[in-house]
Image (cartoon, helix red, strand yellow):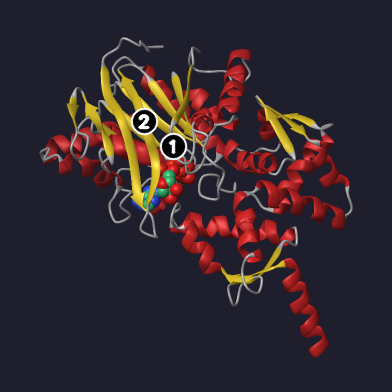
Amino acid sequence: MRTLTTATPIVEVTGVTKSFPGAAGSDLTVLDDINFTLREGEVVALLGKSGSGKSTLLRTIAGLIAPTTGQVSYRGTRINGANPGVAMVFQSFALMPWLTVQDNVELGLRAQGVPPAERRQRALEAIDLIGLDGFESAYPKELSGGMRQRVGFARALVLRPDALLMDEPFSALDVLTSENLRGELMDLWERPDFPTKAICVVTHNIEEAVLLADRVLVLSSNPGRIKGEVPIHLPRPRDRRSPTFEATVEELYRLLTGKDTVTEARNTPTGPLTHPLPTASVGGLAGLVEIVYAHNGQTDLPDLADELSFEVDDLLPLVDAATMLGFLEVEGAQAFLTDVGRDWNTSDILRSKEIFAVQAKSRAPLVRTICSALENSDNGSLRDDFFRDLLRRGFSVDDTERQLDIAIDWGRYGELFDYDADTGELMLGDVAAAAAALLDSEA
Ligand SMILES: Nc1ncnc2c1ncn2[C@@H]1O[C@H](COP(=O)(O)OP(=O)(O)OP(=O)(O)O)[C@@H](O)[C@H]1O
C-alpha cells in the first residue's frame, strides 16, 4: 500500500458545486460543496447511489464540465478546461467504431501532437501492457465487451496520465470479465514502473470499492455531498472472505443506507423535490418485504444482496422505499420488518391495499402532494402536466418522468387515485370509481 495522507496532492477539489438548468427554468443542484484531495500513491473510490452526482464529479475533475462554484486544481494550478494530468476510462468504452484498436489507442497522442513513429510505438506498448497483443488491426465490433474495455484502458494509459479517472469501468462487463480486468489493473498499479500516480474510480458497487480503493468517499444524493470517508488498510490482492473486508463492506453499507446527517441537520422540510420517491415498484417492494418476513423479520442487507446476486444499486432503492413507507427500519446494515410491514405482507389483498394507501399518503411526499392537489381540485382530477411542471423545478426530464411513474404505480395500487394514460388525467380513487360506475350504467 502506498497511501500517505502527507503525500503530494495531484488533484484538489475545493468547494465545488454543480447545478444544471432544470427543464422549468430553475436550477438542479447535483453537487454541493465537494472538497477532497487525490494524492500520489492512492486509489480513491467515489461511491454513491445512482444519481448522486458521481459521474458529474469525475467529469468536473477531468475538466470536461466546469463547476458552478468552487475550483479544481491540478498540481497546484487551477484548471480552466481539460485537466492536463488525467485520462478517463468510461463505462461505455467510448471507442470510435470506424477506427482500429491501434488507431483508437493512438487518438489521444495524435491530439497531443505526438509524432507518428512515437505514437505508434507507445500505442503498441500500451496494447501489449493491457493484453491486446495481436488485436492491433481489429475493429471494436470484432471484440468482446471485456476486450473493448481493454482498448479503453490502453487508450487512457498510453497517455501516461498522472491520475487515471475511471467512471464505472467494469459495470458493463459480466462478473468474471470484470473480476479479471480489475485484478489485472491492480497488478499494473502495484508495479513500480507504472507511470500513473493515483486512481480515482466511480462506482455504485460497494465490494468493488473495497476491492480497489485505499479510501472510499461516500456521496449522498439530492444533492451529492460527501457524507463519509472510509480508509481501507488491506493488502492486495484482497480477499473478499477476510473479516476486515466483510466489516468494511458492512460499514460502507451502513453509510450508504444511513440518513444524510447534513440534510437532517438542515432540517429540510419533506416535499416531493427534497425527498424523491426511490425507484421501486409495488411488486419489487412486496418481494423485498416478503423476503425479510421469510428471514424472521430481520436481515443483514449485504448478505441479502449477495444471496439474491444483486448489486447494491439494485437493492438500495427497494430498501429506501420500504423505509420511506414504514415497512422496514434500517439500523446499520440490518433491516427489520416493522409491525405495519408485517401486516402489509400477511393481510388479504383488500386490507393490504388499505395499509399501503395509508402509508403512501402519509409518508411518500409526491403521493401526498398528488392526493391533496386532487382533493383541492374542482372535480377531483388534474392533468399529469400539472405535476410534471412542478417536478421539473427540481428534476431533470428523465427523473421527472420516473418520479411520476413511481407515484402513479403506488397511488394506483393503494387506489388513492387512478390514471388514464391516453388523456394524461389523474383522478381521485372515488372519482374514478364513480366515473366507472357511470360508464357501466350507460353501457
Ligand atoms: N448535463 C446534464 N444536464 C442536466 N442534468 C444532468 C446533466 N448531467 C447529469 N445530470 C443530472 O445530475 C444528476 C446526477 O447525475 P450523475 O450521472 O452525475 O449521477 P451518478 O451518481 O453518476 O449516477 P449513475 O450511477 O446513475 O450514473 C442526475 O439527476 C442527472 O439527471
Using the image as rendered, state which of residue 122 and residue 28 is in the foreground: 28
Using a 10 Å C-alpha cutoff, classify the residue at mark 1 as few (fewer than 14 neighbours), some (14 to 19) or many (20 or more).
Answer: many
Q: Which residue is mark 1?
A: 224
Using the image as rendered, state which of residue 392 and residue 138 is in the foreground: 392
Q: Which residue is mark 2?
A: 34
Residue 102 occupies quadrant: top left
Using a 10 Å C-alpha cutoff, classify the residue at mark 2 as few (fewer than 14 neighbours), some (14 to 19) or many (20 or more).
Answer: some
State the separation of the CA atoms marked 1 and 2: 8 Å
Asked if marks 1 and 2 touch (Cβ < 8 Å), the reply is yes
Q: Residue furthest bottom?
A: 443
Using the image as rendered, state which of residue 12 and residue 213 is in the foreground: 12
Q: Give the image location of residue 29, x and y in percent.
A: 39, 44
Position of residue 56 relative to residue 306, above or below, is below
Residue 3 occupies quadrant: top left
Q: Residue at x 71, y 33 (%)?
A: 329
User: Amino acid under label 2?
Assistant: Ile
Quadrant housing the N terminus: top left
Position of residue 257 relative to residue 286, above or below, is above
Q: Residue at x 60, y 77 (%)?
A: 422
**Label 2 residue near ligand 1, CB within 8 Å:** no
Q: Residue at x 67, y 46 (%)?
A: 363
Q: Say which label, 1 or 2, has the lower sequence index.
A: 2
User: Is label 1 in a helix, a strand or a loop?
Assistant: loop
Q: Give the image location of residue 324, x and y in percent.
A: 66, 42
Using the image as rendered, state which of residue 180 and residue 336 is in the foreground: 336
**Residue 143 in sight from this viewpoint:** no
**Label 1 residue near ligand 1, CB within 8 Å:** yes
Q: Is residue 303 left or right of residue 233?
A: right
User: Is label 2 in a helix, a strand or a loop?
Assistant: strand
